[in-house]
Image (tube, rainbow, N blue to C red):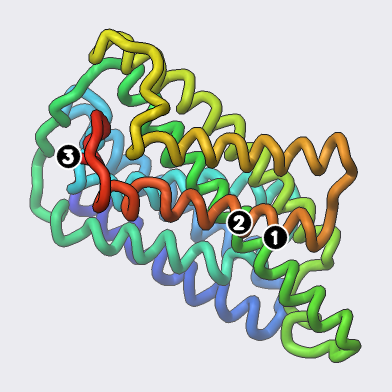
Amino acid sequence: MDAALIISGLSYLISSILYAHRFQRADEGQSKRNLALLLVGFAAQSVLLGILTYEAGTVPLTTQVLPTLCAWLVVIVYIYLEVSTAQQALGALIVPIVTLLHLLAIPDLYGTERVMPVEHSGGWFRLHVLAYILAYVAFAISCVSAVMYVMLLGEIQKKHLGYFYERLPSLDSLNQVNNRAATFGFILLTAGVGSSTVWAHQELDTVWVWGEPTVAPLLLTWVIYAGHLWARYMSGWQGRRAALLSIAGFTVVVLAFPVVGVFFSGVHPFGN
């Protein structure tokens, strides 16, 4: 297990350097090598998480494992976007995030033979946690592409084609990444909301928990991204307006639990 932990960490660290170098030099020749090394890290990390899951008897959704699990999920979403759009510019920002998350878990996992399972169990609990984490990952990527879109559009509108124009994908490509990531995240967020409702019914004997201050922001996030996709597909919103919607939606995601949980209490663990 330690070998998989170190191999994945080194692979991600070198990948971060290579993706940053490719962005700085705009070297298309590095693309396949960068993705291959990222896949090596992902494979080693998959082995690590498989071992931890086998030893714990369930998916180990603990604070000890969550950083590397989040990193693993970020890689899944990013690889999908890179392969489907043939763009690596986002990797210069996203792969370092993956590396940081994974490295944060190494001190807690190195030398550990097994981790304790979480207090809650059951498929619906695991599904709602994993669905939310993966949705947040997709929304983060959507936000990153939206920020890049706004920066690149600013250069173009000012007719000052400089650093970002030379290195970032086209506005159409960034808009495509934003759209696909937001759509992917919304589907997962919807799955999370549904599985949360079922789990709440099983554990708390209630279906409606969305009035709780600690979980209501999730419903607000769902409404924002539903409006985001409706504006894109039904009203034809593209470009800057859609990018600003993605940035606003992710801002709500960031504030949803950590900030609200400090000031309110409720049935959700963040509120306890």
Q: Earlier in the sequence, mark 2 or mark 3?
A: 2
Query: Mark 3 highlights which residue?
Result: 272
Residue at image x 32%, y 11%?
206
- In the picture shown, does residue 167 fall above or below 196? below
Cα distance between the residues tagged 3 and 1: 33 Å
At which x and y percent is residue 1? 20, 46
Q: Amino acid at mark 3?
A: Asn
Label 1 crowding class (10 Å Cα cut-off): few <14, some 14-19, many 20+?
some
Which image quadrant for residue 108? Answer: bottom left
Cα distance between the residues tagged 2 and 3: 27 Å
Residue at disc 2, secondary structure: helix
State if disc 3 and disc 2 touch (CB < 8 Å). Answer: no
At which x and y percent is residue 36? 55, 57
- For this rendering, which residue is in front, 10 or 168? 168
- Residue 139 circle label: none
Instruction: State the quadrant of the C terminus.
Output: top left
Q: Amino acid at mark 1?
A: Leu
Residue at image x 84%, y 53%?
238
- For this rendering, which residue is in front, 68 or 203? 203
Residue at disc 1, secondary structure: helix
- In the picture shown, does residue 235 fall above or below 165? above
- For this rendering, which residue is in front, 7 or 206? 206
State if disc 2 and disc 1 touch (CB < 8 Å). Answer: yes
- In the picture shown, does residue 171 fall above or below 252? below
Query: Mark 2 highlights which residue?
Result: 248
> In the displayed structure, does residue 198 sit left or right of residue 76?
left
Residue at disc 3, secondary structure: loop
Query: Mark 1 highlights which residue?
Result: 244
State if disc 1 and disc 3 touch (CB < 8 Å). Answer: no
Q: Amino acid at mark 2?
A: Ala
Residue at image x 54%, y 69%?
93
